[in-house]
Each structure stands twice: as structure tokens, then as C-alpha cells.
Amino acid sequence: MTRSLAHRGPDAQAVWVDLEAGVALGHRRLSIIDVTSAGAQPMSSANGRFVINFNGEIFNFAELRSRLEAEGIVSWRGHSDTEVLLEAIVTWGLDRALEAIEGQFAFGLWDRSARELTLARDRFGEKPLYYGRLGRTIVFASELQAFRLHPDFTGELNTDVLPAYVRYGYVPHPWSIYRQVWKLPQATTLRFDADATTGVMPEPQRFWSLQEALDWARDNPFRGSEADAVETLDGRLRRTVGARMVADVPLGSLLSGGIDSSLVTALMQSQSSKPVKTFTIGSWDKSLNEAEHAKAIARILGADHTELYVGPEQALAVIPRLAAVYGEPFADSSQIPTLLVSALARTSVTVALSGDGGDELFAGYNRYVLAEVWRRMSLVPGPMRAALGACVQAISPEVWTRLVGWAPFKPRALRAGRAGDKLHKWAAKIGAKDDRDFLDKLLSAWEDPRVVLPASEGDGLLHGDIRSQEAGFSERAMYLDTENYLPDDILVKVDRASMAASLEVRAPFLDREVLKLAWSLPMAMKVRGGVGKRVLRPLLAKYIPSSMFERPKQGFAVPIDQWLRGELRPWAEDLLSEQRLESQGLFNAGEVRKVWAEHQRGVRNWDTRLWYLLMMQSWMDQQAVA
């Protein structure tokens, strides 16, 4: 019997399910086993040819159902989107079905006739899908932990990905932290022939291309005014929000107080006959707190608002769970409030909408507005820029923060607090050789991984670039983020945290038509004069006063730097002790202890570098006892 491993959620157990009884276990053939959600069962097509294990939602399934009925499908066994997907595959074929569906999904499809397994993942990477070869068996799963249940799983650490991890705080696709397991990239399929030899591992194939979508947008630029763009975008987003509001369970919104989540909430409320339930996590650190803004926005919109303020005691309670929740080393520190807000929302709702994707599509991150600053800086010879950066870094972040606070006029990006940390970060990057080097430095915590990984030979840099000679710094950064940071950090953070709380999160910005519209707009409608999300601001102003959101971006963050000098210090000191580091032999103990000491003295704020290492150490501890 071909067996399948379990699971999804905090209380997962081994659930063995036949994907297809009778798949050969012989020397020349592959055994294919599936790892499904706990309690989930595969579904067969009406004609019996296909068997699918599906994780996710198809948002346009009602439209597809009507189209299938018009083509002769009149007998349905139920009302699920999974059944609609199966019959679309039967009627149109897999490629056409994938082109037609709009949703967040990962699935394994067994074709009994062709004896072929196909894995598929949605366009943006909202739902996870891992796969690997364990002995003579192909295994696929929604979580890495499930692979540990297989007798041929070795758990060998993939040290080749560590340079990328210490740069970015995540393991980029297509790799995982284990040598035997890969992540299926977003917008791809992977086909396995059950009769193929065991030594052959196929390559993922794209069924949708971000680059091709951007090529279309470039060839079909938006011709109207900014006011026209606002109205067009309003209609497009209203439709995607409405489609994601379809649910037979309680629905809410994760409201951070920023532009993206506020706009999603406003569009939800405009289409709801009752107050939308909204949820916010606040920080007692006023420089990071947007909860008061979120509360005021919810009041203006007429939403039913719930908030929770996070202190170090809540972080201490959450931190021991992080390694198990995320499955591999993952170090975006906003994982803490994301886990907490998911648990908060789950007390009242089962599905929540978020503003994820708005930053990547409409130039929301601070790095996107640095294009003009960098263009001017790059005219200065590199050695002079490096010397200037060294001078800035010679003054502590705390002193810079006080100096900027006293200044009557200051750049917009320095108005949200922690100005000294931002100045230090920028000063360390301005000696860059060119646009891509500057971007790589901006994205990296440890710019040279070999400093902290003495046995490493790789640089860990992300590869790939937008295919356009006319693309400027901001476009290149947005493309790289959409291909990597979005699926491997932002969406991982939200999916794992929400699923740990049994909450389903949907992101209306992550729609291919919204993306094409966003990229068809002139860059000046997205970022201009040091301000990003230009076109979203007048759109949101249709629903709430602009004074409520026209403020510098603060982000969904917690004061890790302070906690590492205070309540979290004993925990961190244990994980980064010289004895432990030297016995493991993974990190350069001398360099780590130097960074730790500088952080404790307040000479530098190394919270990001330290958090990356701490999450790796915590994960290794969790693996030892799992």
C-alpha cells in the first residue's frame, strides 16, 4: 500500500492515505506519497481519472462552474471549489484550467490514466508546497515537519543555503533547509511519471510568468490621468476584495493602520451590510506603534475593532513556538505580532483579509523611494561615499536619533522614529559599486556571509533581474521583491502564523489583474518626491480623511533591539554563548560575540543580524528534540 503522511496545523498527527493504491514500489519505479492537511481526503473526478489533494481556495470558482455548466457539466456532487477545479481539468485540461483559475492554492494531482503526478502552486506563492525524493519515494507536503515521519528522511542540513539565510533571514526557493527537500516555486508545475527511473528529477515549469505579465504591462501602458487611475484601481480592487469576502464562516480584516490594510478594510466595509471585524496588534514602543491609528481608522469606517498590545512577556511566550510553526529557520521579527494577531483574530473569525502585496506592487517600501537619492550619491566617487558612510557610523544611533529629533526639518523617511538606526543602515550601503550592488546591500543583514560562516564559499546573493533596459532602480527592486521577498518571507510569515491559529488569510492585492494594472501605471503614479504608493493615497482618501494615513511608514514591528538588551537577553545569551557556538562549529563564535557585545553596549543596533542567528539556533534546538 502506498502511504501518505499527515498534516497542517498545530495538532497534526500522522494520517496515512492512499493517493493511488497500486503505485509500484519496485526498483525501476517511483512510489508517490502525499502529505495532506490533517483530516483531509483526496477527491476523485466524476469520471474517476483524476485524484487531487488540494490546499487553498479558488476565488472565481462560481464563474468557472457556470462556464462548465454552459459546456455540458450539469451534474455536481457538491458545492466545493475543489470539485470545480477537478472538472475544469477534465474538461479543459490542466494547462487551460490553471490559466482560468484565480486563487491561492497548492495541490497534487494524480492522473490514473497517464500514471502521472503533477504538483502545482499558485501564481504568487501564497500556499506552500514542498517535495523531495526519499529513497525510491517521491513525497510532497505542505509543511517540512511532515517529512520527518518518513523512514528514509535523514534531516541532513543544507549548509549551501546558509549564506542566503544570514543575508535575508529566510531560505529562498527552490531550496529548503534540508538537502532532500525542495520548495516548489510559485506559478509552476512539476510532473512525475510513476514509471520513470528513480534517478530522474524533473524541472518545475512555469504556467504563469511575472516577467511576461510585466512585458504586457509595458506594451499596454495606462493612458489616463492619475484621477482615472484611481477610479480604475478602485473598481479592480473592489472586485478582488469582494471575491475574497465570499465565505460561509465568520470573516474579518487584519488592520495594521497602514495604507494597504486600511484600503482593504475600507473596501470590505463598503460591501458589507454589518460592521467588519478588525484586529490589530500594538506595541508599547511608541516609535513602532500604529495601533492607535488603526483604532481611529476602524472607528471612521464603522468597523468592529479589537486590539492587543504586545510586550516582552508575550514575545517570551511565543518565541519557543516559532521554530515549530515555521518548520525551518525564518527570521522576520514581525513573525511575533503576526502570530499574535492571527490568534487574536481567530477568537472571532475563521477567515481574514490582509493588505499583503500592496508594498511590492505600489512601491511601499522605503528602499523604493531611494532611487533619486542613490542616483545623486552615485555621482560621487566610491571612496568618498565610503568615507562619508564611515563618518556617519562613527556616531552612535542613539546620538543620531536625538540630533534628528532636534532638527526643525528632516526627510520624511526619518520622521517615524529610530532615525539613527536608519542613518547607520544607509551609511553602510552608500559605498556600493552600482544599482544592483546597492540593492543587494540594502536587502542584506550580513553583507558578507563568510564573516559569520567561516566554512562557507558562496555569497548567498539572489539571482535574476527584470528583463527591461528601461527599468530603473525602483522597478528592479520591486521585481526582485515580488519574485523572492514576497513568496519566501512575507507570505511564509502570514501563512505559517495564520495556519498555526487555524485562521485562513486572503490577500486581495495578489491578483494578476491588479498586478498588471499596477505595472502599467507610470512609475510617477507609484513613487514620486520621496513618497511611495502615490495612487493608493487618493484612493484611500475616498473612504477616510488623508490626515489619518499621511504619515511615514512604521511597519509591523516589535522592539527586538530593546528586548535583546532586556527581557530576552538571558534566552539569547544562552543560544549565542561562546561554548555553544564553538561546539556547533557553524558560526564564527568570535564574530558573533563581538556583534553581541556591541549591541549590548549600544554602540550599534545589530538586532537584525542577531535575530537571524537566534532563529537558526532556536530551530536547531527544536530539531534536536522533535
Image (cartoon, grey):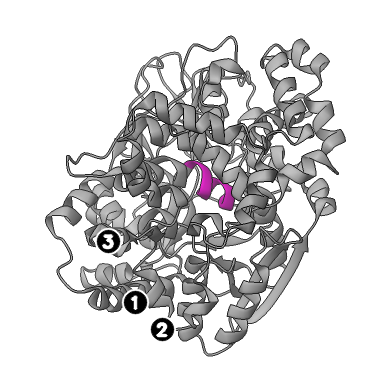
Q: Position of residue 106 (x, y in %)?
A: 45, 47
Nearest to the observer: residue 514 or residue 58: 514
Q: Are marks 3 and 1 in contact (CB under 8 Å)?
A: no
Main secondary structure found in the magenta portion:
helix
The N terminus - image quarter = top right
**Looking at the rendered structure, which numbered label has been put on residue 602?**
none
Q: Residue at x 43, y 57 (%)?
A: 364
How many other residues sit within 10 Å of disc 3, few (<14), some (14-19) or many (≥20)?
A: some
The kind of secondary structure element at disc 2 is loop
Q: Residue at x 18, y 49 (%)?
A: 215
Badge 1 marks a residue whose secondary structure is helix
Nearest-to-viewer mark from 2 and 3: 3
Q: Nearer the viewer, residue 486 or 121?
A: 486
Q: Position of residue 160 (x, y in %)?
A: 51, 18
| 93 up-or-down from 177: above or below | below
From the image, state whether disc 3 or disc 1 is nearer to you: 3
Q: From which residue to which does the magenta span run?
A: 488-495
- Asked if the residues shown at circle 2 and circle 1 are in contact, with their CB atoms under 8 angstroms apart, the answer is yes
